[in-house]
Structures are given as structure tokens and as C-alpha cells.
Image (cartoon, helix red, strand yellow):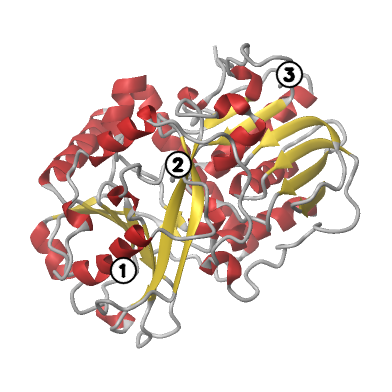
Amino acid sequence: MTSTVTLSVPTTRLEKSQHVFRSTEFADGCLPVENPTKSLWIDSPNANPLAKEGSTGFLPTTADICIIGSGITGVSVAYHLATRSIEKKLPKVVILEARDFCSGATGRNGGHLTPNPFINFSNTKARYGQQEALKALDLESHTAKATLDFISSQNIADEVDLVAGGHITMFVTGEEFLHAKEDYDAVRAAGVDLPNVEWLSKEEMLSIYGVPFPGARYGGHNLWLLKLVTHLYNFAKAKLSLSVHTFNTTRGSISCSYIVHATNAYASHLLPHLRGPSGIVPTRGQVVTVRASVPVEKFRGRPSWDANDGFEYWFPRPVTSTHEHPLVVLGGGREVESRFEHGEIDDSRCNEVVGKILREFLPGLFPGKFEARKQPEMEWTGIMGFTESMDPFVGPVDGYDVSSIEHSNYKGQFIAAGYSGHGMPRAYACAEVVASMIIADLQGERWTAPNWLPHHYLTSSLVD
């Protein structure tokens, strides 16, 4: 290989990352910076018809529900409100966005609709118990199935660039491979059948894909997330009194009964008790697009990939013929930085050290299929929201211990945020939980948790 810098990072990097996360003092809550880097997903021609929606003109002064954030979480909350049975009058919903529509990290960086079938199961089981670990897997399966059902029902697979290519997790070290096998065996021992998981030896991976590392192949999709979110929004707007307002200047105030914080990395700007390592820490992710030097027919299928304990992830974009050279979207590289980009809030620039790793990664992994030292066609960053547990916070904001905050009153406020770089398979379902809580409160009913919801995601002990 021409480069092994990224692939040779020791397997203790995740533990080191978590130690850095806990021991570092991070900046206070922030708003998105101006002039973010240009993203393939957002800045391609005609990709974002709602980009400036509601940025000028009338701003409502009242609403039943205000959703802060127009990404997959915020829009999914509106979608679930539109599809739930509500006995009383349907609520008036307003979505507020500091920048363009769906311009957060998942909209800028996301695309993997791949539920986790077993990875890290043992750690979750050790921390929360087997039932909770199984529910963490169930929530991701629920998200994937519900999303695919929506795409099918609306007949929009081509419009959102849905690719059913499956997914491959590649294990760079023997220790990674053994941990994954332990997770797989633990899920099987818990009574879950995993018929779609196929283990591939180093020799099989080399023969099929040309990479000298073992892997696991299982079901998964990738898509253009912004286009999916646009369809979810339009569906919800057809059924609700719904509007979105993208702006970065004060145009007035809105009175509302409920607030949903769907701002992920930026949650602590409005919720100061979420600042620091015990809350949600902004973390910069970096992505490039690289054109293969050989036609797609030289590749075996169109799977998405992750490697290096998930620090690197990539997938090819759809092509129109087998002779086309595919464009590959690759993210990662932050493990080479001492703080893993935790606390970085500036997505108006890229990190040169991380960029060097991304430029070397695919040519080093797939010799002959990518040209060494070739510049990417695009490069950008997006700010993710990380929690110490790597799990999101879901539920009422006053479920937190906010007693130390003077004059605070968070009644009627909810949150779904902190996806730790794994939002695509979780945000839709977490939004569904928050929407169901609001509807239960609107109708004076007791909220009932869905059977796929891990209770350790919840901000308060709402479950008996």
C-alpha cells in the first residue's frame, strides 16, 4: 500500500478518545459559524429547494410547538406529529433554523442508513444490561425499516438516490476482529438470529474487494439525506399547519407551548447545563469526494464501508453506466488529532492534517483503483454532537438535574440530540419518541414507551 498512516492507528484509540473527551475543558455553547464549507449534499445544483425557506417576510408570533433545528431530527418530529392520531385540533408547528434548511452535520455529512446488527453490543450490555443492549439494536432496525417504508410509499427511491448495496465493516487489527466476533456471539446468545451477517476472511476480502483485512458484510443502504428530509417536510406540511424559517437575524419572538431542541452539536447554546463533557460536545467531522481511476465495473458491488473502529466510512455514489468512474464519499481522519476534533466548532474551514489522511486513505487501501496524490473533487466539514456515553439524550429537558441553574424553567421543552456521529440510524426514531411525548401531554394521557426504545437514552425515568 502507498499509505498506512490511518490503518496503523492502535486499537486503544477509542479509549483514548473517551479519555480526552472527559478530561478536556471545552468551549461554551455556540451558534453555527457563518460561511460553512461547501458540501456535496447541500451545495450541489438544485439539491436544497428549501434552503432559504422563510428567511424573509412574515414570522409567526405564536405556535403550539416550536422545533429548533431543521435537520433529520427536527423535521422527523414534525413528520411524526403529522402522522399520529391526535384527538384535538392538529397543532400549529414552526421550525426554526439558524442557517439553510437541513444544514447541520447529518445533512452535510450523512448518508449511511445502516442499522448496527451487533457492533459494540458487549460494552452496552455490560453498562446497561442485555435488554437495553438489544433495544439499542432494535431502535436502529426500526429507523431503517420505517425510513425505507416511507421511501417506498412515496415512490421516491430514485429521487433520494437510495442504494441497497449492503455494508461492510473492515477490521484492521486482530483485536478489532476478535471484539466484533465477541459482540456477534453475544447477540446470538441473547436469542437474536443474524442470518444476513456474513464473515469474510482476509483471503476472501482480498479476492473479492482487493483489501487485505477481514470483514463482516450485512444489510444496509445509503442515500441523499437532504432530499429525504425535504420529502418528510413536504409530507408533514401537507397535513399540519407547518412552516420553516431559516434566518440568522432577530425578526421577533414566538410564543409557544412546547419547544423541541433538535440542534445536536449546538444544543448547549440554549441549554447551558449541557455544556462540557457531561453534556453535548461539538466535534468536527471532515469529508472528501474522490473520483475512482477505474470504472465501476472494476468494483464488486456498491456497498458502503466503515473501518478503523468506525473512524473512516465511505460509499460510492450511484452511476449511470458500468463504464462510469464512480465518485466516492469518504469521511473520517480525526483520530490523528490529539483531541479527535472534540470541541471544534468551526466548519468554515478544513483541518489540513485530517485532509492529508483522507487523501491517502483510498489509494493506500485500494491500490490501482484511486490515483495517489490526486486532489479530492470536494472537501468540507460539519459539526457533530458527541456525548460521553456515545448515546443521544431523548426526552423532557427538565429531566436533567437543572437545580443549579437560577431561574430556569424547562417545562414543556424536549430534546433529541447528541448522536455522536451515528445519527442517521437513530435520529428518526428519537424524534418519534419526542413527538409521542408531546402528543400524550396534549391529550392528557400517560406516555407509553415503544418496545424498541432503550431506556438509557431517556433524560428522565418516565418508564416504570
Residue, x 38% and y 23% (percent of image)? 131
Q: Position of residue 231 (x, y in %)?
A: 67, 59
Residue 144 horizontal side relative to residue 328, left or right: right
Q: CA distance from mark 3 to mark 2?
A: 32 Å
Q: Amino acid at mark 2?
A: Glu
Disc 3 versus disc 2: nearer the observer: 3
Residue, x 33% and y 21% (percent of image)? 127
Q: Position of residue 460 (x, y in %)?
A: 57, 18
Mark 1 closeness class: few <14, some 14–19, many ≥20 residues within 10 Å: many
Q: Amino acid at mark 1?
A: Arg
Residue, x 26% and y 49% (percent of image)? 197
Q: Is residue 86 above or below residue 129?
A: below
**Residue for badge 2:** 140
Residue, x 43% and y 53% (percent of image)? 285
Q: Do the residues under discs 3 and 2 have CB atoms within 8 angstroms?
A: no
Of marks 3 and 2, which one's residue comes earlier in the chain?
2
